[in-house]
Image (cartoon, rainbow, N blue to C red):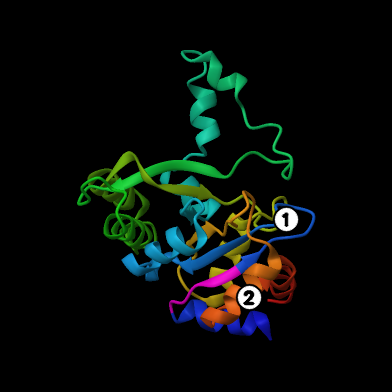
């Protein structure tokens, strides 16, 4: 029942709370379809969650449009900057794949890029651009014309076989978008606690109850994904 509630909420532009796994990050992310992000969404994420606000891109779209993993950008530039190769993210304790971080962007109509209004604009326009019906070359041109990098919105690229070789929040949230039938980009933010760690699962559940939000776990998404 929880997954059905989550799918309904996503379709209606609401935030859903997604906990990954007890043997992974043990974190909960606020998750919303990128196409529905508003300044109020950003405000809620930064005040009630407090983690890094990121926007996901399906692997196929990232590859088609030339949106790289940041680790690849660093590796390719490591001849000039050898330290970048030395700092490769090959020892992430909860993940045996590379980091999902892509580049960072601001929409060119933003000012500093960090305000609630600016980040909401960047995220909505990014999702609208990458999922438009235009040919790839037109979308690439639109990204170049309308966005600057680096910026204040962190892009995350999913793994190539979603939920097969990686089961992080990037993949879980993007899979939830696909299950919900919306544009498959999610905007996510980790929920942090008041004692220096992630917000506990029990505290997240209490928050969800107080705000009328749906709480689901990674296993709920994996089960629905397998049955789709």
Q: Position of residue 57 (x, y in %)?
A: 49, 54
Q: Is residue 31 above or below residue 97?
A: below
Q: Residue at x 29, y 54 (%)?
A: 115
Q: Position of residue 220 (x, y in %)?
A: 71, 73
Q: Which residues are magenta?
A: 13-17
Q: Residues within 10 Å of mark 1 (few under 14, many from 20)?
A: few
Q: Is residue 58 left or right of residue 139?
A: right
Q: Earlier in the sequence, mark 1 or mark 2?
A: 1
Q: Is residue 131 left or right of residue 82?
A: left
Q: Residue at x 65, y 74 (%)?
A: 205
Magenta-drawn stretch, dominant element (helix, strand or loop): loop
- Badge 2 is on which residue? 206
Which one is closest to the eye, mark 1 or mark 2? Answer: 2
Q: Nearer the viewer, residue 182 or 156?
A: 156
Q: Secondary structure at mark 1?
A: loop
Residue 164's tag is 1
């Amino acid at each position: 029942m929880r997954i059905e509630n989550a799918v309904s909420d996503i379709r209606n532009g609401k935030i859903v709370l997604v906990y990954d796994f007890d043997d992974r990050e043990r974190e909960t992310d606020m998750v919303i379809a990128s196409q529905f992000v508003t300044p109020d969404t950003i405000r809620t994420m930064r005040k009630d969650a407090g983690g890094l606000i990121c926007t996901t891109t399906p692997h196929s779209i990232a590859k088609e449009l030339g949106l790289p993993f940041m680790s690849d950008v660093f590796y390719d530039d490591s001849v000039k900057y050898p330290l970048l190769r030395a700092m490769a993210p090959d020892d992430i304790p909860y993940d045996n794949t590379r980091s999902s971080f892509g580049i960072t962007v601001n929409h060119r109509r933003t000012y500093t890029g960090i305000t609630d209004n600016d980040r909401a604009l960047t995220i909505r326009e990014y999702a609208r651009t990458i999922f438009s019906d235009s040919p790839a070359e037109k979308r690439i041109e639109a990204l170049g014309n309308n966005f600057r990098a680096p910026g204040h919105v962190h892009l995350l690229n999913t793994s190539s076989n979603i939920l097969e070789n990686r089961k992080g929040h990037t993949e879980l949230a993007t899979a939830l978008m696909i299950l919900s039938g919306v544009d498959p980009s999610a905007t996510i933010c980790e929920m942090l606690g008041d004692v220096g760690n992630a917000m506990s699962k029990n505290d997240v559940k209490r928050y969800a109850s107080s705000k009328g939000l749906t709480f689901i776990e990674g296993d709920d998404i994996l089960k629905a994904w397998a049955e789709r």
